Amino acid sequence: MNIESLRQAATDGQFLGVDWGAFVVVFLVSFASAVLIVAFYALGLRLLAVGSADDTGADGAVVSTASADRPLAATVGGYACLAIGVSAVLYSLYLIIPQFH
Amino acid sequence: MDVLVTVALVVTIALFFDFTNGFHDTANAMATSVATGALKPKVAVTISAVLNLVGAFLSTEVAKTISQGIIREGEGGIEITPSMIFAGLVGAVLWNLATWYFGLPSSSTHALFGGLIGAAIIGAGINSVDFGVVLSKVILPALISPLVAATVALVATYAAYRLTRQARARGSDRGFRHGQTVSASLVSLAHGTNDAQKTMGVITLTLIAAGYQPSGTAPQFWVVLACGLAIAIGTYVGGWRIMRTVGKRITDVQPAQGFAAETSSAATILISSHLGFALSTTQVTSGAVVGSGLGKRLATVHWGVVGRIASAWLFTLPAAAIVGGLSAWLAVTSTAGLVVVAVLAAGAAATLFVLARRHPITHENVNEVPEEAPQTAPAGR
């Protein structure tokens, strides 16, 4: 391990035979996509719950089952957020199934 | 005659390895769904089994070398004989069964690599193994994948709770359970496209080495079918011992955590294999469960359990290598030696199954956690 090999690593991402550049890309893309998908799905659920009381208490017990009217904007926004999750699933299927590419 | 015996033994143990692979890895996709009550245990393993079978047929591309360059095979290197493959598989199978007995998730791929490395060292000398490749393809990814998955799942879990008023908003638990079912199914499908292929590669290589199949041809249909069925049956039978560990003992997984963990796992696995830096499914999912425990306010992560899993990962490669090496030492001598190894391995496997029956964990008690962790009612039922 010398300075030259470190300098090399800084430019092409190769060090100890491992492509660290590819690893960093994997980490960043996984992080961004997973967090965005989960956040949009959660936001969708929250928007669809607008207007209704919470159905679970702080201790996890069911406290309410009543539903109430929801503003149109919340309905549209909620389903739009869920649609992001659906498209992520379709894209995953595209990635998994080799016949598609 | 000798060749036929060898090939028959290799095919048998390869299919059995495939079975333990499915058995072990059910937990990866389905443990959190079973723990949160998103799916009934039997339904979860059925879905996972079917998707693994479908996955086995989807893949057309078979890994050209089973060892991915870890063993210097082919031109200018060593020749991998069917007896060495057999010995390697013995090491992998026994390690898989031992970790299953202790309920520890561990990578079947690493067990296979370990077994083959041991067999290659004994059968062809220490120079037959490229330790640089071992470091870059096995050891570093094993350190990296759980950290990546845990970080992703930690932030995702925090976001999921934050956005749904700690999952108290109306319908959020139900919504997270549905989402979790979908992302867990994706993990199962991705698993089927990868793992059944390894066994297909092993069997095809053996058939080619024995002269039953022309070199450079694709796996025969019966091989694809047998491997798909072996992994699916293994998945359906289910490693309930491992599922309890992943779903309940690392941390008591709740629907929002399960959704965040499975989605993070699916994203990490798909993106890493798509970008050519494949990470182990087992290590990604276990890391994601730990992350989901850290991301929820007031949730407890049982570090003792995490430590036991981590040490199992550390030992996977050397332990499988030792068993693989010992088996190779006996198996390469003669066909009789090979049969002796097969009998000993069957005996060891049977012993572990008998031991496991003394404290059975089945689909009925998978969510019950004795003593140390506080008992919580399975949600949603």
Image (cartoon, coloured by chain):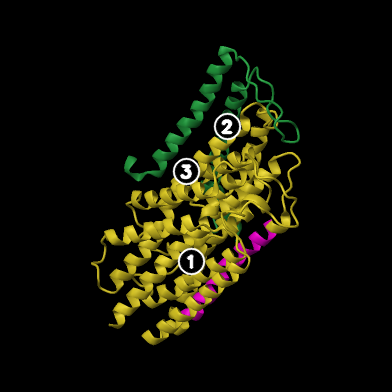
Query: Would residue B318 be counted in the magenta stretch?
Result: yes
Residue identifier under label 2: B175
Q: Are marks 3 and 2 in contact (CB under 8 Å)?
A: no
Could you tell me residue A30's position as x and y percent?
Answer: 54, 41
Residue furthest to the left: B214
Residue under the image location 44 percent in, 39 percent down? A92
Point out which mark residue B113 bears. Answer: 1
Q: Which chain is green?
A: A
Residue identifier under label 3: B186
Could you tell me how many numbered marks the image carries? Answer: 3
**Image quadrant in which the N terminus of chain B is located:** bottom left
Q: Which chain is yellow?
A: B
B145 or B19, nearer to the observer: B19
> Taking B134 as reference, is A29 above or below it?
above
Could you tell me residue B376's position as x and y percent?
Answer: 71, 46
Give the mark toward the camera: 1 or 3.
3
Q: Which kind of residue does numbered mark 1 sit on?
A: Phe
Tell me the crowding category of disc 2: few under 14, some 14 to 19, or many 20 or more residues within 10 angstroms, Cα based: many
Query: Would residue B321 be counted in the magenta stretch?
Result: yes
